[in-house]
Image: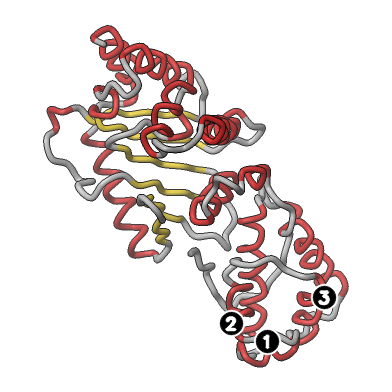
Amino acid sequence: MITPHAGGEPVHPTPMALPRGSSTVLRIVLGAQLRRLREQRHITLEAAGHAIRASHSKISRMELGRVGFRVRDVADLLTLYGVTDDDERQPLLALVERANVTGWWHNYNDILPSWFETYVGLEESATGIRNYEVQFVPGLLQSEGYARAVVKLGFPAAPEEELERRVRLRMARQRLLRSAEPPHLWAVLDEAVLRRPLGGAEVMREQIDHILQALELPNVTVQIVPFSVGGHAAAGGPFSILRFSQPDLPDVVYMEQLTSAVYLEKRDDVDRYLEVMERLCIEAEPASRTREILTRIREEL
């Protein structure tokens, strides 16, 4: 799970200025601010928990943004931390309400595992999303037919209704790219992603057309790593890097597994993946050639 940076500087919360703040991100931001206030006063987790009639572990989960917040608890903690001025308290208390608002993806709770729900919430508030993929087209760039083929591959025994809900969830996520303040999506695809005829040749042609249409958006960049490169920097497999404008949120590296996911936010880990991503972008064909490559592969299908 993601942990916010902790520092000693004074807190001047401005929650209304948060860009596209999903409930996931707002909980992390609020938790980070509460943690900073507690540490400035040298108050232990145990003492903070006692003040709201809770355990120290609950305070820890609140500061990590892993649980919802109650206005009463936050108000009591602010009093304990010496934040008594209304001009300082009200922005934080207002943030509680915003942090507890459920996102649109909660309508898919029946098919959305908690480890991926976190990613969707972070994705909604990211200003930059960088993907490297070796097997599948990234979810934000998948056509409906291709998405259906991917879902069937992952859930072969699921009933048709569930399969369609999973496809609709994936399509709903793509609205982000055309939102008022969209993130910059920069995807690097191994050539194998486009050569593997998932769903058949016609589905793949539609998928390539879908990527070509996405490239018309100013916030979408796609590069392709050709087979001719041979071995390359990302030998460990696919990953995503999410970046945020909010200073309380570090960059996050996301790696999905079959039944879970790994989130990395330690500076050394993130820097290593950023270095690998930069080397991939150098080894890949330049973005200016992507349309040409996609068109050629489409004609060969």
**Left or right of residue 240, residue 173 in this image:** right
User: At numbered mark 2, what does the secondary structure look like: helix, strand or loop?
Assistant: helix
Q: Residue at x 76, y 53 (%)?
A: 16
Can the viewer see residue 203 in this picture? yes
Q: CA distance from mark 2 to mark 1?
A: 8 Å
Is residue 95 positioned above or below 131 on the image? below
Residue type marked 3: Arg
User: Looking at the rendering, which quadrant does residue 177 occupy?
Assistant: top right
Residue type marked 1: Gly
**Left or right of residue 150, residue 95 in this image:** right
Of residues 82 and 66, the one drawn nearer to the viewer in this rendering: 66
Check disc 1: other Cα within 10 Å, few if <14, some if 14-19, many if 20+.
some
Is residue 229 positioned above or below 28 on the image? above
Q: Position of residue 118 (x, y in %)?
A: 54, 54
- For mark 2, what is the residue? 57
User: At numbered mark 1, what does the secondary structure look like: helix, strand or loop?
Assistant: helix
